[in-house]
């Protein structure tokens, strides 16, 4: 159903004037016939049109409200994914949303502000919900950081190191970087993790608004 413009109602004949006896009779009959005939039919159709349009408007308003709620949910996921706090097991004290953590190989989106993050276990507490697959949490870093599989790191300062030493990868794990610096260098220490079958070791990168996206395949091929 859609909003439909009403059909115009025909004009009525000239109404009889009780003060004009000469024309009263000649006008009364056609006026009464119009009221009880086409005019009545058209007014009923107009009333139906108004009712249908009101019903459609209510339906559209409900759909818009639902879409707004969905958009808010998506925004919450995006904001949470952009505020990765690290491994849940490494955190303590209060934690405010938006925030995302990783625990037991999954990413979790925070739904409630927590007074003590250690008291709310992801997968157990209703304060967490599993983050949808395919959304890569991002972490803005300005100091040396140990890589957590599944995170896209935003390089926010020169001279820092992303360290993969001792990191345990599973098939399909994601790793990515984005540069938020225009000049300077930073380091990726691949450790034992291969990059496209090559043993890279410690790689010094000169900033140039680069980006990197890799997915772990296996120990032989590494990140590809």
Image (tube, rainbow, N blue to C red):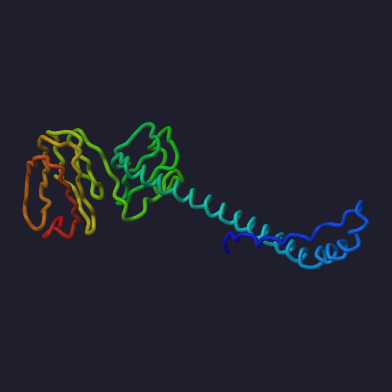
> Tag count in the figure?
0
Which quarter of the picture shows residue 87? top left
In terms of depth relative to the viewer, which is nearer, 159 or 24?
Answer: 24
Q: Position of residue 105 (x, y in %)?
A: 30, 51
Residue located 12% across and 59% down the image: 221
31 in relation to 118, above or below: below
Residue located 74% across and 63% down the image: 44
Q: Position of residue 59 (x, y in %)?
A: 59, 56
In terms of depth relative to the viewer, which is nearer, 168 or 59?
Answer: 59
Residue located 72% across and 62% down the image: 10
Which quadrant of the figure contains the C terminus?
bottom left
Q: Is residue 30 left or right of residue 89?
A: right
Q: Position of residue 207 (x, y in %)?
A: 12, 40
Q: Position of residue 91 (x, y in %)?
A: 32, 36
In terms of depth relative to the viewer, which is nearer, 86 or 62?
Answer: 62
Q: Residue furthest front?
A: 22
4 in relation to 112, above or below: below
Q: Residue furthest right?
A: 21
Which quadrant of the figure contains the N terminus?
bottom right
In terms of depth relative to the viewer, which is nearer, 112 or 139?
Answer: 139
Q: Is residue 67 left or right of residue 11?
A: left
Which quarter of the picture shows residue 165? top left
Q: Is residue 26 left or right of residue 127?
A: right
Q: Is residue 188 left or right of residue 1?
A: left
């Amino acid at each position: 159903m859609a909003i439909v413009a009403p059909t115009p109602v025909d004009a009525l004949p000239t109404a009889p004037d009780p003060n004009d006896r000469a024309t009263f009779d000649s006008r009364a009959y056609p006026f009464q016939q119009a009221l009880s005939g086409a005019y009545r039919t058209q007014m009923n159709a107009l009333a139906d049109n108004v009712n249908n349009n009101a019903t459609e408007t209510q339906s559209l308003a409900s759909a818009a409200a639902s879409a707004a709620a969905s958009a808010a949910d998506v925004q919450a996921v995006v904001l949470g994914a952009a505020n990765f706090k690290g491994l849940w097991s490494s955190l303590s004290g209060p934690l405010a949303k938006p925030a995302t953590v990783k625990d037991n190989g999954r990413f979790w989106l925070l739904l409630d502000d927590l007074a003590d993050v250690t008291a709310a276990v992801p997968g157990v507490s209703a304060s967490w919900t599993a983050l949808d697959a395919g959304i890569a949490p991002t972490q803005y870093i300005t100091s040396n950081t140990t890589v957590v599989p599944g995170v896209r790191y935003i390089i926010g300062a020169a001279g820092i190191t992303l360290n993969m030493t001792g990191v345990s990868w599973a098939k399909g794990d994601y790793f990515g970087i984005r540069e938020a610096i225009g000049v300077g260098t930073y380091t990726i220490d691949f450790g034992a993790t291969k990059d496209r079958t090559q043993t890279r070791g410690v790689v010094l990168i000169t900033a140039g608004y680069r980006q990197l996206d890799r997915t772990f395949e296996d120990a032989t091929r590494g990140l590809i």
